[in-house]
Image (cartoon, helix red, strand yellow):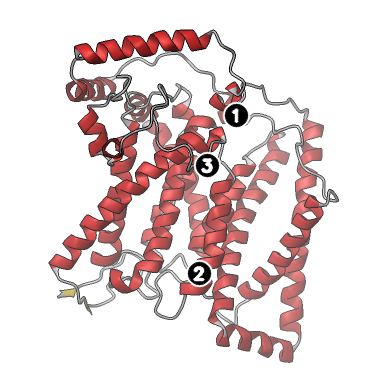
Amino acid sequence: MIIPLPHPFVGTLGPISNPLTIYHHIVFLTFLFLIGACIGSFLNVVVWRLPREESLSHPPSHCPECNTRLAWRDNIPVFGWLFLRGRCRYCAVDISARYPIVEFITGSLLVGYYVLFFLYRLGPCNPPFTDLRNDWPAFALLMFLICALIAASLIDAEQFIIPLQIPWLLAIVGFVVHPIIDGPKTPASLNLDPHSLAAAIAAGGSIGLTVSMFLFLLGKMPQSFPKGEPALEIDTVQETGPMKKGWATKLVEYILKIIRGPLTPRQIELRRAQEKLKRKNDNIPAADSHKDDPQRNEPPPQYKPPEIRLEIGKEMLFLLPPMIGALAFAIIIHSSKSVDLSWMSLLQNHRWVSALLGSLFGALVGAFLVWIFRIAGTLAFKRVAMGLGDVHLMFGVGAIIGAGSSFIVFFLAPFAGLLVALHGWWFSAWWLSTSCCFSSTIPARLSSFGCGLARAIPAPSSHWCSASL
């Protein structure tokens, strides 16, 4: 089977023989959708439990209303919700349609990326993906990133936060997996050119970052905004109450009404019993009631412009060791011919070192871009321009996709947010009608930079040739 390889950046790459038949692709596509739907089911758990500081493994899946443990058949992705007709088996409370939607979208994304990467070859071309049986580690790494960003964007849209566990898990996975799998025949590899400055900058910057973090943990490096950051402009949007129902809302509600159908006599009895139990429990003060509200309903602290500049100065102090380390290491490596040759020999003979430095370089570049714009914007406008969660997120993203793609993602993110803002009312009307826990502030949150990052990732992921360094 011969497939021409058009590419929007580099033109036609010429025909490359594809050893797979249509039957291989059908099997792979089916498997990816099933595994993606299962991952989507887990992402629903992450989105609900992680911001509430609950364990992801215990207790097992249960109804959040009546706390009854779900049967295995109720946990079947997509179909479990359909079999239950969108209602809990034990208390008849409506189950949010967000659960099957996230499961279906996650499975569809894995299928879509397989089609782009392996059939149309619109993806990493150093070299391109050819056979999932050989290229599954690199493909799995990229899909891990996509799934993590789904969870991060949903949590950010709902709770106004990006849990640090997600970007730091991305960074750790990138730092560990790239040195293991990257090589001359690995798609999306981050091996750096031994003759470039990038490897030396990555090494020196990483050493400087380690110094800053060590000093911070020892209490020698001051923390910015120790009482909490002031609210971003996007966070000051007030809830406007119930939204006016548009055609999208009415359409989704009509579909859900058909799926759920009328309540049976047993469901009416179960719902009444649950409402009676809920009224009884409402009269009992809960010891850990704060877990139901990740934001604690506490207003953010207020800062005057001089105080904001002082706090941002602490962040500039934190960035000094990485910047000095990167500059000093690059000068040391390239100022002596013997040291330079030894350095190049190390990178050429130990590709895992080159891959690790490539991942570190991507993380540093991604985080540095957002942090510099955060500092510059804050000093210019005398109010916090971006959240530190965006810095952490780009650190994790850069560790997996590299420096060049991180650069593209950073500048595409505002446009991705703008596109959603232009269609915000339509999108939010559809999403609000399928979720039981989102508020009317979501149209604004979906246009934030953090959510824009997650939607900007697919562009460089699908056109890696010009995005890699």
Residue located 57% across and 47% down the image: 165
Mark 2 or mark 3, which is nearer to you?
2
Give the x, y percent position of residue 109. Answer: 31, 50
Between residues 77 and 403, which one lies in front from this camera angle? 77
Residue at numbered disc 3: 450
First in sequence: mark 2 or mark 1? 2
Q: Is residue 75 placed above or below 273 in the rendered structure? A: below
Q: Secondary structure at mark 3?
A: helix
In the image, what residue occupies the spot 13% across and 66% down?
Answer: 23
312 vs 64: above or below = below
The answer to whether the residue labelled 1 contacts the one labelled 3, judged by CB atoms less than 8 Å apart, is: no
Residue in the foreground of this view, choosing between 144 and 292: 292
Task: Look at the numbered disc 2 and give the secondary structure of its residue.
Answer: helix
Q: Which x, y percent locates residue 440?
A: 45, 21
The residue positioned 47% from the left and 37% from the top of the image is 59
Residue marked by disc 2: 178
The residue pinned by badge 1 equals: 233
Mark 2 crowdedness (10 Å alpha carbons): few <14, some 14-19, many ≥20: many
- Specify the amino acid type for callout 3: Gly
Q: Can residue 335 be seen in the rendering of this structure? A: yes
Q: Secondary structure at mark 1?
A: helix
